[in-house]
C-alpha cells in the first residue's frame, strides 16, 4: 500500500481561508466510468476540478492523499484505521481540517474507530462518500464533498467549528460514533437515532452548537494499537447452545458485544447464563448493546436483563454496535488491568454514549 500526494490548484490566494487535507481511501465517491474498460475505475485526483469545478471557487489550500490500491470498504481493517490515524497525526499541524473519502458500507465503523484513536481532537475530521459515482449525472458525490470541505474549513473565534470525527452525508452532519448506515439505495444513507445532528444543511449550514463537543484542554494525541480479539453475538429467538458456545469459547477472545433485545434483555435459559458466566469468569468483557435503533440498554428493568446485571455484563446505554465494537478494540488495545478496562468501557469517552 502506498500514498500518492496531489496538490490541487484552486487559484488560492496567498492567504487561504483554510488548508484542508483530503484522504481518499476508496469507495464510490472517487469512481468514474471508464468507457474503454466499461466499468468504474478510481479517477485521478489531479483532475478533480474537471469533475467538481465548484472547488475552484474556494479560497482553500487543498491537498489530496490517495491510498493505492484503493480500499473497498468491505475490506477495511484495524490496520487501515491505524494507518489513517497515523496520516492525520503526521499532518495534523499542517492543515486546519481533514476530509476522508470512504466507502459507505463500513464508514460508521471507521468513523467510530478514528474517534477513539484520535484523542483530544481540536480539528474536524469529516468522513463522506457517495451512493452514486462522481462521474454520473445524478450523483450525490459533488454536494457531499463540497459541503464536507466547507465544514472542515469552518472556524469561529479562531477555532475549528467542529473539533471531532463526523460523517457528513445528504444534508446531515452526524457525530461519527453515533451514526449508522440505514439505506443502500437512497441518498440519505446515514442516521443518528440517539443523538441529534451536529448540523443540517439547506441554503445555509445550521450548526447545533450545544451538541458539538467542546474543544479539549489537553494536547492532541493518537493511539497506536487496537485489539482485534473481539466479537459480536447477535441474539435471536431459537439461538442454540452450540452457536453461543462457538462465539464465547473462541480462542483468545477478550471482548464481546452482545446484541440483545429491547432495553437489554436476553434469554434466561440456564445453559445461556452459564456460558455467559463462564466467559466473564475467564476475564472476557461483555458489552450489552440493544438491537433497536433507538432507545437504550437499561439492565435490570426486566427480569430477563437482571441476570446480566448481576453477573457483571456492562450496560452499553445508547451506544451503536459500530461504536461498541471499535470502543472495545481501542480500550483493550490500551492493555490496562481488568478493572481499569471495565471502567473505561463504562465511561463516555468521545461522546459515544449518553450517561
Image (cartoon, helix red, strand yellow):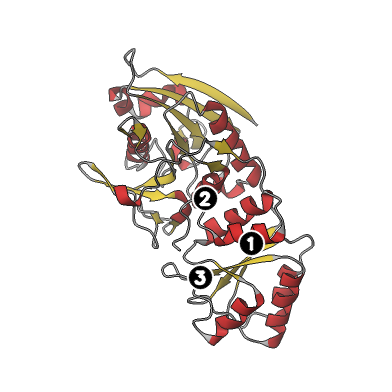
Q: Indicate whether 290 appears above or below 68.
A: below
Q: Residue furthest left?
A: 203
Residue bearing the label numbered 3: 291
Say whether marks 3 and 1 touch (CB < 8 Å): no
> Crowding at label 1, few (<14), some or many (≥20) Cα neighbours within 10 Å?
many
Question: Is residue 38 something that shows in the picture?
Answer: no
Is 325 or 184 nearer to us in this picture?
325
Badge 3: residue crowd in 10 Å (few <14, some 14–19, many ≥20): many
| Quarter of the image where the C terminus is located | bottom left
Location of mark 2 (residue):
112
Say whether marks 1 and 2 touch (CB < 8 Å). Answer: no
Q: Secondary structure at mark 2?
A: helix
Tag 2 near tag 3, CB within 8 Å: no
In this rendering, the label closer to the viewer, 3 or 1? 1
Residue 263, position as x, y percentages in the image:
48, 76
Circle nearer the N terminus (1, 2): 2
Give the secondary structure at mark 1.
Answer: helix
Q: Indicate the position of residue 341 as horizontal and vertical percent values.
A: 65, 57
Residue mark closest to the camera, 2 vs 3:
2
Secondary element type, mark 3:
loop
Going by the picture, which residue comes out furthest to the top?
A: 14
Residue 75, percent from left and from top: 61, 47
Closer to the chain start, of discs 2 and 3, is 2
Residue with the mark numbered 1: 342
Residue in front for this viewpoint, 120 or 70: 120
Q: Residue at x 72, y 84 (%)?
A: 271
Which residue is located at x 68 percent, y 49 percent?
A: 333
Quarter location, residue 283:
bottom right
Is residue 306 toward the left or the right of residue 15 in the image?
A: right
In 3D space, how far apart are the residues under numbered discs 3 and 1 (Cα atoms)? Answer: 22 Å
Give the CA distance from mark 2 to mark 3: 18 Å
Amino acid at each position: 500500500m502506498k500514498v500518492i500526494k496531489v496538490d490541487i490548484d484552486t487559484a488560492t490566494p496567498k492567504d487561504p481561508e483554510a488548508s484542508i487535507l483530503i484522504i481518499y481511501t476508496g469507495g464510490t465517491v472517487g469512481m468514474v466510468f471508464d468507457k474503454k474498460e466499461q466499468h468504474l475505475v478510481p479517477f485521478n485526483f489531479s483532475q478533480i476540478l474537471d469533475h467538481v469545478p465548484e472547488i475552484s471557487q474556494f479560497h482553500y489550500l487543498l491537498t489530496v492523499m490517495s491510498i493505492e490500491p484503493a480500499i473497498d470498504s468491505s475490506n477495511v481493517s484495524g490496520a487501515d484505521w491505524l494507518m489513517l490515524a497515523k496520516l492525520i497525526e503526521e499532518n495534523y499541524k499542517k492543515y486546519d481540517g481533514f476530509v476522508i473519502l470512504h466507502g459507505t458500507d463500513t464508514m460508521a465503523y471507521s468513523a467510530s474507530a478514528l474517534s477513539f484513536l484520535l484523542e483530544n481532537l481540536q480539528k474536524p475530521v469529516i468522513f463522506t462518500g457517495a451512493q452514486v459515482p462522481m462521474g454520473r449525472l445524478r450523483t450525490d458525490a459533488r454536494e457531499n464533498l463540497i459541503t464536507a470541505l466547507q465544514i472542515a474549513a469552518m472556524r469561529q473565534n479562531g477555532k475549528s467549528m467542529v473539533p471531532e470525527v463526523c460523517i457528513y452525508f445528504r444534508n446531515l452532519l452526524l457525530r461519527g460514533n453515533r451514526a449508522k448506515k440505514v439505506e443502500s439505495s437512497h441518498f440519505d444513507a446515514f442516521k443518528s437515532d440517539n443523538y441529534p445532528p451536529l448540523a443540517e444543511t439547506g441554503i445555509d449550514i445550521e450548526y447545533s452548537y450545544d451538541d458539538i463537543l467542546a474543544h479539549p484542554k489537553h494536547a492532541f494525541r493518537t493511539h497506536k494499537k487496537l485489539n482485534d480479539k473481539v466479537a459480536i453475538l447477535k441474539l435471536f429467538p431459537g439461538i442454540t447452545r452450540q452457536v453461543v458456545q462457538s462465539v464465547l469459547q473462541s480462542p483468545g477472545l477478550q471482548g464481546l458485544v452482545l446484541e440483545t433485545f429491547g432495553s437489554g434483555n436476553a434469554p434466561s435459559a440456564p445453559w445461556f447464563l452459564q456460558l455467559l458466566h463462564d466467559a466473564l469468569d475467564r476475564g472476557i468483557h461483555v458489552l450489552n448493546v440493544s438491537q433497536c435503533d433507538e432507545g437504550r440498554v437499561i439492565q435490570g428493568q426486566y427480569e430477563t436483563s437482571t441476570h446480566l446485571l448481576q453477573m457483571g455484563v456492562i450496560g452499553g446505554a445508547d451506544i451503536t454496535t459500530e461504536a461498541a465494537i471499535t470502543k472495545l478494540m481501542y480500550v483493550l488495545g490500551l492493555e490496562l488491568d481488568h478493572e481499569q478496562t471495565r471502567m473505561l468501557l463504562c465511561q463516555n469517552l468521545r461522546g459515544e454514549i449518553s450517561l
